[in-house]
Image (cartoon, rainbow, N blue to C red):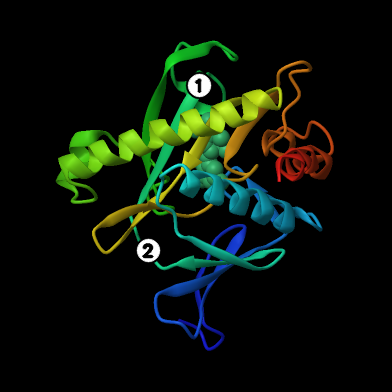
Amino acid sequence: MDDDGLVYEGKAKSVFRTNVAGELRVVFRDDITAFNGVKKDTLAGKGEYNARVSAFFFEYLEKNGIPTHFIRMEDERTMIVRELTMIPLEVIARNVAAGSIVKKFPFTEGQRIEPPVIVTDYKSDEHGDPSINDDLIVALGFLSADGLQEVREMTLKINTLLKDFFAKAGIDLVDFKIEFGRSGDTICLGDEISMDSMRLWDQKTGESLDKDVYRQGKGDVLSAYRKVVDIILQTN
Ligand code: 5GP
């Protein structure tokens, strides 16, 4: 830990210790990166947009029975969260084929995946975030067989809740990535749920409202992110 209490600095968020044991402060920065940090920029306001959307979804999921690390917002870009022991997995749910799954398997872009699939990557910059299967997850001690089942059920429930929410706003939830951690014996949703970690397609225009706008250089990133914020504001 640094003198200023920094415990972790990711590509778009910084995590600090607070003076309350078991609580952390997560600051959503304006940095945006793609291709494992090869493309990098700073977009004023982006941190605030992602923080708002994340906070909204954490509260929405909590209300629907999903335990999350969210406690409260401290300011527009700063979230107070419960400290979790993170499980080093990126859990990805997919409703429509896009991104890496189209490169790796014979899906066509835009193809519906019904029932949805869950895939998992080992979160490790050192190892390049490789795909990992259930046997490896258990063998490495990341989760027990029961824990794995719980994560799978929670992910499918989160998928249904988010998909239904976006469908009402005329948006397809294509896919998203989430991360879990432990608070005592409870497996909780951690990290974030934002336009950096979901793919969202406007049902009418096909327009992306997520980080693909940045990855693929296909328009104004902030105005795409803003559209998602506006949907959240209309529901509040
Ligand atoms: P893909 O595997 O197609 O690159 O990504 C699938 C989904 O997970 C996309 O919504 C993407 O934004 C999200 N995702 C995958 N890896 C990461 C990551 O390292 N960080 C974030 N924030 N999202 C990710």
**Residue 79: x %, y % from top left:** 59, 65
Identify which residue is drawn at 71% across, 40% down: 235
Task: Report which quarter residue 232 is drawn in.
Answer: top right
The relative height of residue 148 versus residue 190 in the rendered view (above or below) is: above
Q: Which mark is residue 84?
A: 2
Secondary element at image label 1: strand
**Residue 91: x %, y % from top left:** 40, 39
Q: Is residue 47 left or right of residue 22?
A: right
Residue 50 seen in the figure? yes
The relative height of residue 98 versus residue 228 in the rendered view (above or below) is: above
Task: Report which quarter residue 221 is drawn in.
Answer: top right
**Residue 145: x %, y % from top left:** 16, 40
User: In the rendered view of the protein, which quadrant contains the N terminus?
Assistant: bottom left
Instruction: Please name the residue that numbered disc 1 is placed on.
Output: 95
Amino acid of disc 2? Leu
| Crowd around label 1: few <14 · some 14–19 · many ≥20 (10 Å) | many
Q: Is mark 1 within 8 Å of ligand 1?
A: no
142 or 145, which lies in front?
145
Secondary element at image label 2: loop
The relative height of residue 236 versus residue 86 in the rendered view (above or below) is: above
Q: Is residue 211 left or right of residue 88?
A: right
State which tag comes first along the sequence, 2 or 1: 2
Task: Tell me the distance, in whole angstroms, between the alpha carbons under discs 2 and 1.
Answer: 28 Å
**Residue 192: x %, y % from top left:** 54, 51
Q: Is residue 184 left or right of residue 216?
A: left
